[in-house]
């Protein structure tokens, strides 16, 4: 881990850290983030304990920060795993660091290694987590919510289980949307629609279709296609993602 000076922190952030942590605390790493500033914080020796400092930037940072705090607390009260909040101030929160690879790293590695079984088990766990959150939020808030930002990077596999981070995009919604978007994301990490990704997606759809409960698999398929159209437009891709998916869909009989 590389040691850096904490010059990239604002005065308010340094103040926050000095109040909360030992004076040897510094920025050890800066994460790439489109909207926010996210840092790994720890002793300059590079030894633990580590923390995550997330400063909300871009539009409505305070509102997004409040939402992240609200849902981190909700997850903490549930059976789901999420980082604890250590401190909040201004546009920043200081949260527990969760050690482990994220689902995208694991997914890319398993595709390279052509490893299917463990990956499939892990993705089924992520689907169960997504479903549980939807149900738990219905019970605790009176309205079912989805994560919406379903990027595989927002799931971390730690020693004690699968954690969910990054809750600022949670919105009321139906479970089929999160699951459909999850599968659309899986299919479109680069390179898109490889035979490995198609096999994973088909297996996940089959798995969801056989589950009992309030899941409408046709709606999941509709959400996958909707998200694929959005991804196609967002990335200005030449390949027709929608058509690629309809080929898979034909081989599925819900
Ligand atoms: N509690 C945490 N433990 C470990 N890593 C984290 C934690 N929170 C954030 N990260 C890392 O920082 C990255 C960006 O943080 P995130 O909350 O997802 O914000 P955003 O996606 O808006 O940039 C994550 O993808 C992850 O790599
Ligand atoms: Mg994120």
Image (cartoon, grey):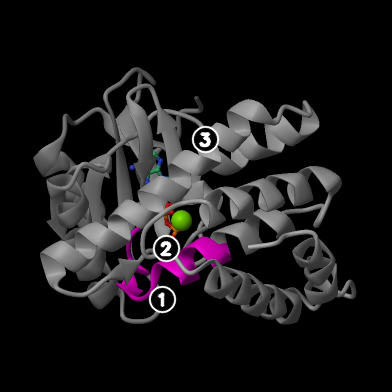
The residue that mark 3 highlights is 122
Q: CA distance from mark 2 to mark 1?
A: 7 Å
Q: Is residue 236 above or below residue 46?
A: below
Q: Position of residue 216 (x, y in %)?
A: 48, 69
| Region in magenta | 165-181
* CB under 8 Å between discs 3 and 2: no
In the image: residue 51, left or right of residue 127: left
Evaluate whether residue 101 shows in this view: yes
In the image: residue 43, left or right of residue 73: right
> Tag 2's secondary structure?
loop
* CB under 8 Å between discs 1 and 3: no
Residue plotted at (51% across, 32% down): 101
The residue that mark 2 highlights is 36
Q: Residues within 10 Å of mark 2 (few under 14, many from 20)?
A: some
Residue plotted at (25% across, 27% down): 24
Residue plotted at (64% across, 28% down): 117
* CB under 8 Å between discs 2 and 1: yes
> Tag 1's secondary structure?
loop
> Tag 3's secondary structure?
helix
Q: Residues within 10 Å of mark 3 (few under 14, many from 20)?
A: some
Q: Nearer the viewer, mark 3 or mark 2?
A: 3
Whether residue 178 is in magenta: the answer is: yes
In the image: residue 64, left or right of residue 188: left
Q: CA distance from mark 1 to mark 3?
A: 33 Å
Whether ligand 1 has any atom under 8 Å from the Cβ at mark 2 is answered as: yes
Q: Position of residue 103 (x, y in %)?
A: 54, 40
The residue that mark 1 highlights is 58
For the C terminus, give its image quadrant. bottom right
């Amino acid at each position: 881990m590389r040691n850096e000076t904490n010059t990239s922190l604002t005065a308010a952030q340094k103040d926050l850290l000095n109040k909360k942590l030992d004076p040897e605390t510094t920025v050890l790493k800066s994460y790439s983030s489109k909207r926010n500033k996210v840092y790994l914080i720890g002793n300059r020796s590079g030894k633990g304990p580590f923390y995550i400092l997330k400063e909300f930037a871009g539009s409505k940072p305070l509102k997004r920060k409040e939402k992240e705090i609200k849902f981190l607390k909700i997850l903490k009260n549930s059976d789901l795993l999420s980082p604890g909040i250590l401190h909040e101030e201004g546009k920043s929160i200081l949260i527990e660091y969760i050690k482990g690879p994220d689902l995208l790293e694991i997914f890319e590695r398993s595709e390279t290694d052509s490893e299917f079984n463990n990956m499939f088990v892990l993705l089924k766990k992520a689907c169960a987590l997504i479903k549980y959150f939807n149900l738990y939020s219905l019970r605790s808030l009176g309205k079912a919510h989805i994560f919406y930002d379903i990027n595989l990077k927002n799931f971390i596999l730690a020693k004690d289980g699968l954690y969910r981070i990054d809750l600022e995009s949670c919105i009321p919604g139906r479970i089929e949307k999160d699951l459909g978007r999850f599968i659309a994301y899986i299919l479109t990490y680069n390179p898109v629609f490889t035979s490995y990704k198609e096999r994973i997606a088909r297996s996940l759809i089959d798995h969801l279709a056989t589950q009992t409960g309030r899941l409408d698999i046709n709606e999941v398929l509709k959400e996958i296609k909707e998200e694929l159209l959005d991804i196609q437009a967002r990335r200005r891709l030449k390949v027709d993602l929608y058509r690629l998916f309809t080929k898979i869909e034909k081989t599925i009989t819900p």
